[in-house]
Amino acid sequence: MFLKNNKGQSALEYLMTYGWAVIAILVVIGLLYWLTSQQASSQANCATGFPNVSIIANSLTKTGLQMQLVNGTGKSITSAIVGAKFTQGQTVKNVMSANPGSGATMASGTSGSTGIFTLNPTGGLASGDTLVDLNLTYNDGIFDQAATAQCRGKIA
């Protein structure tokens, strides 16, 4: 009589243990999917950025790309201009110069100051995968400098 009850109890414990494990795995997979889709819709993945000028934050939306650059040159940067080419499938939109916002001059003699640049192509952007080729020109107090970077992102 006791053997019959023990078999039923151990079968139920077996099913409950594996049932909770499956539920936990599904919750983790759901959270990972949600976190990666949220990040891809609002932020572009930019390569290391420009040499000596890093992209520390960005936002890619249907209106364009906004990014924050930090000066790592050790010199004062003036006349900073960012140009961009947005590519979505076969569609290419160019922005010849960015509105530098507070970034026309970065660092009054010190390294580490930031500037915010906004690149808004005419007509906006469509949803989907977007490639952005960036060109930065600036004067470091001695020479005019030029650098390139690339960002990839998905617009929701």
Image (spheres, helix red, strand yellow):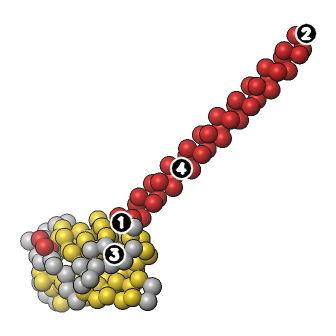
Q: Residue at x 29, y 84 (%)?
A: 84
Residue 14: % across, % down: 76, 29
User: Residue 30's mark?
Assistant: 4
- Dot placed on the residue nearer the N-terminal end, 3 or 2: 2
> Given contact means CB atoms under 8 Å apart, are the residues at marks 1 and 4 in contact?
no
The kind of residue on which mark 3 rests is Gly
Q: Name the quadrant containing residue 69.
A: bottom left
Looking at marks 1 and 4 on the same chain, the residue that comes earlier in the sequence is marked by 4
Residue 62 coordinates in the image, percent (x, y): 31, 73
Q: CA distance from mark 1 to mark 3?
A: 14 Å
Secondary element at image label 2: loop
Disc 2 packing (10 Å; few <14; some 14–19; many ≥20):
few
Neighbour class for label 3 at 10 Å: few (<14), some, many (≥20)?
some
Q: Which residue is mark 2?
A: 1
Check if mark 3's residue and mark 4's residue have beta carbons within 8 Å. Answer: no
Q: Nearer the viewer, residue 21 or 62?
A: 62
Percent coordinates x, y for residue 79 in the rendering: 12, 83
Sequence order check: which comes first, mark 2 or mark 4? 2
Is label 2 in contact with label 1 (beta carbons under 8 Å)?
no
Camera-side mark, 1 or 4: 4
Marks 2 and 1 sit apart, C-alpha to C-alpha, by: 64 Å
| Mark 3 / mark 4, whichever is N-terminal | 4
Q: From the viewer's side, name the closer residue of 145 and 11.
A: 11
- Give the Cα separation between the discs numbered 3 and 4: 32 Å
Residue at (41, 58) in percent of width and height: 38
- For the N terminus, the image quarter is top right
Identify which residue is drawn at 70% across, 31% down.
Answer: 17
Mark 3 vs mark 2: in front: 2
- Identify the residue under disc 3: 49
**Mark 1 Cα-neighbour bin, 10 Å: few <14, some 14–19, many ≥20:** many
Q: Please give the label number shown on residue 43.
A: 1
